[in-house]
Amino acid sequence: MCTLPDLMKHFEGAAKMLDKLKARDLSSYDFTSLEVQVNTAWHIDLDYDGMVDPSKRLLHTATGDKRPGARPHFSLMCTAMEGPEQLTRWVEEYPGLPDSAAVLDFIRHAIATPYAAMRSYLPEVLLLPLKLRPHEPTLRPFLDSLPAPFKWHIETPATAELHSEIAMAGREDRFAAYVAEARKAKEAGNAAFAQRDRSGAVKQYLDAMNIGKRALDERASEESMRRERVRNLLAVCAANCAAACLLEGEDMNAELALVSGKIAETMDKGYVKGYYRQARAHELLGNLDMAIKVMERARARPEVAEKSGIDDYLAELVLRKSESGK
């Protein structure tokens, strides 16, 4: 089971790992020496993820394009189909549609720098979506240079429609199932919390967060509001998990509460409880300066609706710091 630090590492460290992989120089990489693994196929998808604000937070589709600084957000994903398994080899996000050079760079990285422990190889078939046909002149010289029995195709309009219907149906079903399962785990966590069962509550909230992450990974719905609600669900579960960690008793764990609060903020920067949980954890760890910084960060967020208590809590923290003489 994924632990809280594991989740934090995923949510905050994934970008750093991607940056490291993307920075790898592939100019001298010998793609022609790679093994072609027969009976494997890769599929690349180009998705519109919705409108985002300058901090890359998804906006409501009805108002996103009217928000100052809002822009469309797209992503490319390479999925490897190896028998019954479907593995994500590479994902990259773009502020606007990627150009031909970016698409070629994406394909090269999907081959040479896959995620986790996946190895570099060539599939027998690479299927490109119809939406990438305008980039064919740039992609063809590279793809044609790869050794047989490697083959590549761009979907026809008919196959594109069929693949889209099949893929979206499966994704939507999995997305809905994961969301329902995550909510069920969250309710179980709430029940355990009501009984002051710290370990039971933490386990259930952590399960809900892991399952909710799977829903986001499905990339099922192009409706940004639906995905935003899942991110909010993750934020609530993370904040609740922090609250369970902070229940009074000998097993109180401020360190894990702090990690959970950070996850809540990462998932939904407008959810004020994520900030409160972090500040409280910092208090218990004896770091009033960090607690103050967290609440100042909350007060600065324009989308934080529950501002009524922030100033009072912040004033209390400042007073306590002053009285402590630190």
Image (tube, helix red, strand yellow):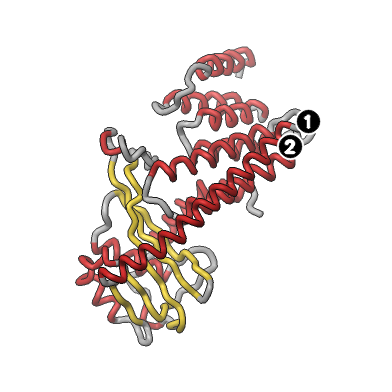
Which residue is painted at 36% across and 53% down in the image?
93
Q: CA distance from mark 1 to mark 2?
A: 9 Å
Above/below status of 39 relative to 283 = below
Which residue is painted at 55% across and 32% down in the image?
274
Within 10 Å of disc 1 (Cα), the crowding (few <14, some 14-19, many 20+) is few
For residue 3, side relative to residue 23 (left or right): right
Image coordinates of residue 140 in percent, x first then y, are 24, 75
Assign the N terminus to one quadrant of the image.
Answer: bottom right
* Mark seen at residue 249: 1
Above/below status of 8 relative to 108 = above
Which residue is painted at 62% across and 44% down in the image?
184
* Mark seen at residue 321: none
Q: Amino acid at mark 1?
A: Gly
Residues at discs 1 and 2 in contact (Cβ within 8 Å): yes
Where disc 1 sits, the SS reads loop
Image coordinates of residue 159 in percent, x first then y, are 31, 71
